[in-house]
Image (tube, grey):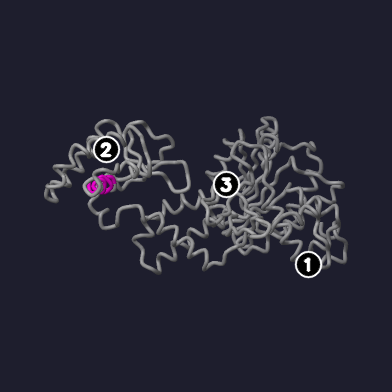
Amino acid sequence: MKQRLFGPSKLVQKITLKDLNEDDRACLETGAMQILPSCDSSNRPILVEFPSLRNFRHLENELRARFYIYMSILEAKNAQIQGTTFISYGVGDYRERLNGVGFVDLTKLALACPPFFSALHLATSDLKHYILMSSCFALVGPKMRARFRLHLGSHVECQYQLSTYGIPCSALPLASSNNNKSLLENHLRWCKSRFLQDCGETEFQLPSKLTALSANEPMAYDVVFGRKKIQHEGNRRLRLFIRSMAAKYDESSKANKRRVRDELIKEIRNAGGKFLIMHEDSSSHEQGFDELSLEEVHGKIAQAFRNYRRPRISPTKFETLEPEDNDAVPIIVEPGPNDVLFGRKRNNEGNKRVRKLVGELSTEYDVAPKSRKRELTNSVVQEIKRLGGRFLRQVVETDEWEQVPDEYARGKISKHFQNSRRAPKKSFGGTL
């Protein structure tokens, strides 16, 4: 197959982008076949095919482009040891449009190339295609059938089925779980890096599609640091990881904290994300992005853990919490009218009720011993909960709210009692 595609002179040589002509490279850039930046749960590289993106002048152009991709994926050590996961994603608008043109040659190429496909998944929304492929694979040997899985349904259904086999939905380059729009930024960035690696900038001119692609332009799963609060998908995922790892991080020693940060960095990078910092040109006021070094990333994430922990009660106080307070913190999108919202200038009905209760009890609180003060603050908390209210605080840089433990709420209310005593003429509602 290699001799047929590249000639006898290339039979014992490594194939690079220099050996592909302009039509071959154009076929490569379509994204019909992509090596994803993340791996599955078994740490196997993922190779995905989008049949509807196939576009070539001659079939040999596509064959040479795919041969190059097959040989490129073998450069990963885990592909040599554990094999590769292959996905043919023909759901919705990604269905095959060329009526199977070149199917036999493409199959022969895949069988002739060295990569071992340890798992093969075919996802489709076409019932006829599903039945046809089921009939075909009923004829193959048991070893092949054990590695092959068919998935029928919509985008959401097929992606859920793939996730049960250790393939995260976020790994697929789709705009959303129910969208026909594909994201080619990762693939084009991979093409650009391979182009510069194989050809160099001086020997060949980059194609216009790759020249326009900024090396560090933020993508969906990149984490962007900057002076302002940045609403970005990668930043949102980082906050979710920090929230889930905060307890483990707080209990760890200094050395183990670095391991926790390494684990988080690996999760972000396995999904194809990078860590960027935003800067602005003072003269042109244009924004740019630079990739951070590993040590800079560790410093930023360590600060993020400290920022997440700062508004919470200290770890020693957590020892007094009831068992139910240590459960996972629920996320509330829309607070209710009886909820108490912590933050500045909150005029929710629950906040007004707390201010009224604190005002009624402030005289007794001022002269009460410490044990009685705790009872008074707890009575305010219980009264709010009796009326169906919750104590919420806003998640950093999002519009979501999370419920706080009772001990945290008692600490806040105790602070309001103290503020009302120190400055009786000034409303303390600004912090509640």
* Residue at the disc numbered 1: 200
Magenta segment, which residues? 409-418
- Can you tell which of label 3 and label 2 is closer to the viewer? 2
Does label 3 or label 2 sit earlier along the sequence?
Answer: 3
* Residue at the disc numbered 2: 355
Q: Quadrant of residue 270?
A: bottom right
| Foreground of the two, 227 or 273 | 227
Q: Is residue 114 left or right of residue 273?
A: right
Name the kind of residue labelled 2 in the image: Arg
| Label 1 residue SS | loop
Neighbours of disc 2 within 10 Å: few (<14), some (14-19), many (20+) = some
Q: CA distance from mark 3 to mark 2?
A: 45 Å
| Screen quadrant of the C terminus | top left
Q: CA distance from mark 2 to mark 1?
A: 68 Å
Q: Are marks 3 and 1 in contact (CB under 8 Å)?
A: no
Name the kind of residue labelled 1 in the image: Gly
Q: Is residue 307 left or right of residue 144?
A: left
On screen, residue 402 above or below 26: above
Q: Can residue 129 be seen? A: yes
| Foreground of the two, 378 or 46 | 378
* Residue at the disc numbered 3: 170
Q: Position of residue 358 (x, y in %)?
A: 22, 39
